[in-house]
Image (cartoon, coloured by chain):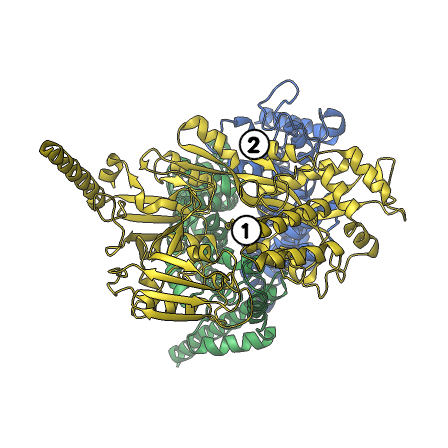
Chain colours: A blue, B green, C yellow
Amino acid sequence: MKVARITALAFLVVVSAACLFADFVAPAPYARQFRDVPDAAPSHQHLLGTDSLGRDRFSRVLYGTRVSLLLAPAAALLASILAALIGGTAGFVGGWLERCVMAATDLFLSLPWLFLLITVRALLPLNTAPFTSVLITFALLGCLGWAAAARVICADARTFCQSDFILRARASGSGGFRLLWRHIVPNLKPVLYAQFWIAVPVFILAEANLGALGLGVAEPLPSWGSLLRELESFSPLSSQPWQFVPLVLLIAVVSCFHLAMKKQELSV
Amino acid sequence: MNSSSSARSATRTVAVHATRLAVILLLGGFLGATLVRVAPGFGTDESDLDSRLSQQSMQALRQSRSSQDSLAGFYVRYLGRLLHGDLGTSRTLQQPVTQLLKDRLPETLKSVGLGLALAWTLGLTLALASVMSRSWFVDLFGSLLAGVLLCVPAAVMAILFVIAQAPARLVLGLIVFPKIFRYARNLLARTAAMPHVLTARAKGLGGTRVLLWHVLPVAAPQLLALAGVSVSVAFAAAIPVEALCDLPGIGQLAWKAALGRDLELLVNLTMVVTAVTLVANSASDLLGNSARAGAV
Amino acid sequence: MRQRLVRLGVLLLFVAVTGAAFAQSGSQLRFCLHSEPKTLNPVLMADESSETVRYLTGGVLMRLNRLTQQLEPELATSWKVSEEGKTISFKLRAGVHFSDGTAFSADDVAYTMQQLMDPALHSPTGDSFRSAEGKVITKVEAKDRVTVIFPAPVVGLDKLFDQVAIMSASSPKKEMAVLGPYYVAENKAGSYLLLKRNPNYWKHDAAGVQLPYINSVRLDIQQNRDVEMLRLVRGEIDFINAVDPEYFDKLAAQAPGTVTEAGVSLDSEQMWFNQVASSPLPAYKKAWFTSTNFRRAISNSINREDLARVVFRGHAQPAVSWVSPANKVWFNAKLQPHAFDQKAALQMLANDGFRLQNGVLRDREGHAVEFSIITNAGNKYRERMATMIQQDLAGIGIRLNVVTLDFPSLIERITRTFDYEASLLGLVNNDLDPNSQMNVWLSSAEQHQWNPEQKTPATTWEAEIDKLMRAQASTLDQKKRKQAVDRVQEIVWQQEPFIYLVNKNAMSAVSKNLRNAHPVVLRPQVYWNIDQLSLGSEVAQNR
């Protein structure tokens, strides 16, 4: 188990270093089009081949990792914090507040938010820099992604508030903030972690899907989402398994984070 | 005396719940309508780019699309018709919404049902196996599987299913599965680490008995809450999955309505989704409460 | 002599028997629609799926043979257009019945014309007949004779009837009673349409066997092109009308003999700048976009060869002007595609006071040249073209921002708010006659995208286009029309209100089981001769 953790950590360090120093590591700028070799197979020049416009896929994966690895967890963190605040407070306080918050989350979960996203794109000036538009996309995703997690957290918080040892703690005189901080938050941590790690890849994929609607990473900036979109036209007719590298990388990074975090999570 | 008062309180509870449901539903419909109305491109149509249409036709068609009155006016009229059982007519599909819902809802229910069955069977089995066996290998396998499935775009999964000639609606199950597995595993692991379970184990009780007597009853309320959430999650996931896999359910309908800015259709679909979410979540709350009451 | 007669008789019998075998077997043709048909009323049809249904079910007075591009008699055995081009008289086929058994007569033609020209219905098909204000009169002269009189000459009048499916005036089934080879038997919303052969279809083959050969047609609604491809390879569908360039080569490698490339099509991809005077753009940007030098410089900086080669895998040609080279009659052969020449582009920009400073192009007042191009999200070929243009323009110091929008948002920007700088879209063209694009070229028209609905032409060249387009529409003299249209192509080539990028090739894939298919450039590429198609015997037995 320890070996697995160290391997995972090492992998993450390598990936982060590679994408942080992408300017030095990448063999070509991410936007450069080698128009004579579109859809090329891996070679010395292009380690992972090229995409449909002849851009070096390895470079794009590096830069895309930088964008997504930075922003998706940030958005997931935002969503988890919102969920913890809203769900936790509702579960802790209970009563009418809980009922109102739960009704609001129900409502929130069933509204067609697509339109909000489309409207936001329409409100943005057309000449927005690609990075700004990604930033806004992820911020929006973070703001909209809390509701499902909040429900789960609220249910959890409520159960804990009614559990024996909290009652005992209350009886022994600890109350309010101290109770929340010392007893409830630590116990909610695993659920929060679970929600966070569910949210990271979900946001990455959501960004990819929004790209299909015009709200996402603008060309030529790469992101994991836009790289994964390439796979949609995957067919058994095309024998290009290297197209799967971004997907494998995403899975590997998420799994490694999971492995690496686990010990700390338990040691808290 | 006692029984009549409890009956009265039960009636009151039901009435309160029903009112709450109705209010949220109406609010949901209104908010949905607002979002559609303020979205850019409302009132446009592909015929705006049809070069065959004469100037007069083009202007008349535009007029007919934009002549709908204000948002509030629309909503009041909509509610008026709703009371008479008329859900209106879809602009883009030129069919009564009632008919569209009748055609499409069964398809979605089938997808959601199958998806949920798959997700719960797989998710709960793996979660139980990983907690009860306490083998890191099983745990890793489950986590990896869930992780992989979380990371694969739905469109890619759909294509893979088509290649494998498997029914596309199972994609829905694979989308919901990771959520169920992760939450259930954490929950069960936490419950299994509780003092009374440890004591039971120390006393030499078998795995199955510990599970049935000590773990599941404690975890039941939250599992039920998860069940409610999973229904609404499955419903929400049905939209992209149906749109991508060409399954003619209400998810696909919602997608088309969104792209066509079809106000009447979307208001109704928002209400349906809100109703499903509400009912699922309220049911899970009620069941969770009663299970907790039973456990206490 | 006698022996020969016997042989002939045996041969005819054989043909009749095999023909009947085709007809009687449970043969089913399957292919995909990419969206649900929006309506089944032939008068109101405008989207591609509806038009497919109309082509398969509608009986027309005459049909444009998609291979020879000549009109052929169908329900009208003969017709005559008057010299001034206002009147057309038909002699109708006798003994024809609708799919529900009602007899076909001149009244049905009159009814169809009345529906088609009903001002309240706003039929796109009907509007293409409208050349001037006024009523259209249909005179029923006899059961089999009918004359339609238009208020003003309509150029290419007879060809327009290829789109007019005759509806029954008296059938209780309304538009569901048809005269074409098939009728709609089942419509499972959002899933499929099942068409069955029309038992009363009038056409017979040389051996006297009633057409069509194939018993039923199943149209599966399948948006996903990848899945459509897989299904073709697997033999679940029989053809794909328009194959994506990406898949063409894959299919050619995997299943040789199934794909055909019929040559360059009528469709074009183009970009244009917003020249609307009242648009919310800053004045200096309006000045750029209305400058001919600026537009031509941009056009010269785009490498069209690369677009065709990389984005369309070589299955497209650099475009010249608004008439595709596929349109042999109307294309102005003197024009060549604009060459990729960034030096010349910078020279032209210098004439307007632009200069390149440290790799950034600036205008006379020092504004860095940066603009956005909008295109519809989800169309990967357009997104890729925009990305390639982005890199091309970077070569002359211009920063281009690519913005993909969902279709309604895009339409709102280019037709209502005019809040955009440049747009990249395609034009789907079905009609060979340039008159069908009247609403694009008249400066007063709505579809005059770069600056619609002008009270008076904003520029002298737009005024000249107006004059020429009106001239070609008011004469039936082919030579004069050709001259006018050639001149309009020249003006557009010089002024570039639309910067034409590429013309896509028409590519189809047909399974080997489908017999007698001859894919062509014009829509519907594969099934234009639907009543002649037949399926290989193995498939016929299987289904």
In the visual, does C92 lie left or right of C494? left
Which residue is the site of mark 1?
C478
* Mark drawn on residue B85: none
Q: Distance between the residues labelled 1 and 2?
A: 37 Å
Image location (x, y in percent) of residue A207: 62, 45
The residue under label 1 is which amino acid type? Gln
Residue at 49 percent of width and 34 percent of height? C247
Which residue is the site of mark 2?
C313
- How many marks the image carries: the answer is 2
Quarter location, residue C535:
top left
Q: Is residue C190 above or below residue C141?
A: above
Q: Is residue C16 above or below residue A240?
A: below
Q: Mark 1 lies on which chain?
A: C
- In this rendering, which labeled residue sits more in front, label 1 or label 2? 1
The residue under label 2 is which amino acid type? Arg
Residue at 56 percent of width and 30 percent of height? A243
Image location (x, y in percent) of residue C412: 64, 60
Residue at 36 percent of width and 66 percent of height? C146
Image location (x, y in percent) of residue B264: 51, 68
